[in-house]
Amino acid sequence: MSEMELRRLAEDVKSLTPQAKVALRSEFERRNFGTSSINWGKSLSAPQPPVLRRKANLVGDAAGEHGEVIRGKYSAWIHVVIAFLLEIVIFAFLIDWIAGALLPARVDAFGLGIALGLAGIFSVLIFYDRWRCIEAYASRYCTGFLNISILGVPLVAFIYANCRGLRKLNGK
């Protein structure tokens, strides 16, 4: 097509479908004819995803941060509960292991109870005021089938919760 033919086609741009407009515009740009003399209209721009404008002090569930987090289609509450319990078990194991290395006597059931209590306190501090944010983030990875999601989503929630816990130490 020559430049004159393309310009004639462009005169009737308003009656073209959006796909034809895009094709015509890309042909113009490919041939470097320029597009400044043609009004292509607003229908050529693809819909843009919404821009999330985060407020400066929007941190935690109480501030409504969970409403700003991009969610998945399915709920991840059970996965966050599993991640919370996994957090307690891992912290209790670490506390018990450190106590066993530092103390000459063997750690008994009472010591394990203390380790579980301390681990529960640490876990609550990590998940406090972030539970809904963790659930919203983890929901992105839910497939809708619990038996499939249960394999990976609790791990995602566990890792995200600990990342948020480290950020909480920095005051963010």
Image (tube, rainbow, N blue to C red):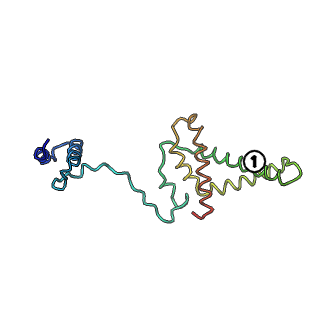
The residue depicted at 56 percent of the width and 38 percent of the height is: 149
Residue 23: image location, x then y, percent: 23, 43
Quadrant position of the C terminus in the picture: bottom right
The percent coordinates of residue 154 (x first, y second) are 60, 43
Q: Residues within 10 Å of mark 1 (few under 14, many from 20)?
A: some
Q: Residue furthest right?
A: 105
Q: Which residue is mark 1?
A: 93
Residue 76 falls left or right of residue 24: right
Task: Name the residue type under label 1.
Answer: Phe
Q: Nearer the viewer, residue 8 or 66?
A: 8
**Where does the image place residue 1, in percent across and percent down from the top left?**
14, 41
For image coordinates 19% across by 53% down, the residue present is 35
What is the secondary structure assignment of the residue under circle 1? helix
Does residue 149 appear to the left or right of 53 in the view shown? Answer: right
Residue displayed at 63% across by 46% down: 83
Q: Residue at x 75, y 53 (%)?
A: 117
Asked whether 136 or 152 is in front, the reply is 152
| Above or below, comparing residue 143 to residue 8 in the picture | above
Q: Nearer the viewer, residue 33 or 22?
A: 33
Q: Quadrant of residue 147?
A: top right
158 left or right of 49 in image = right
Q: How many marks?
A: 1
Horizontal side, residue 46 vs residue 77: left or right: left
- Residue 98's x, y, as percent? 79, 52
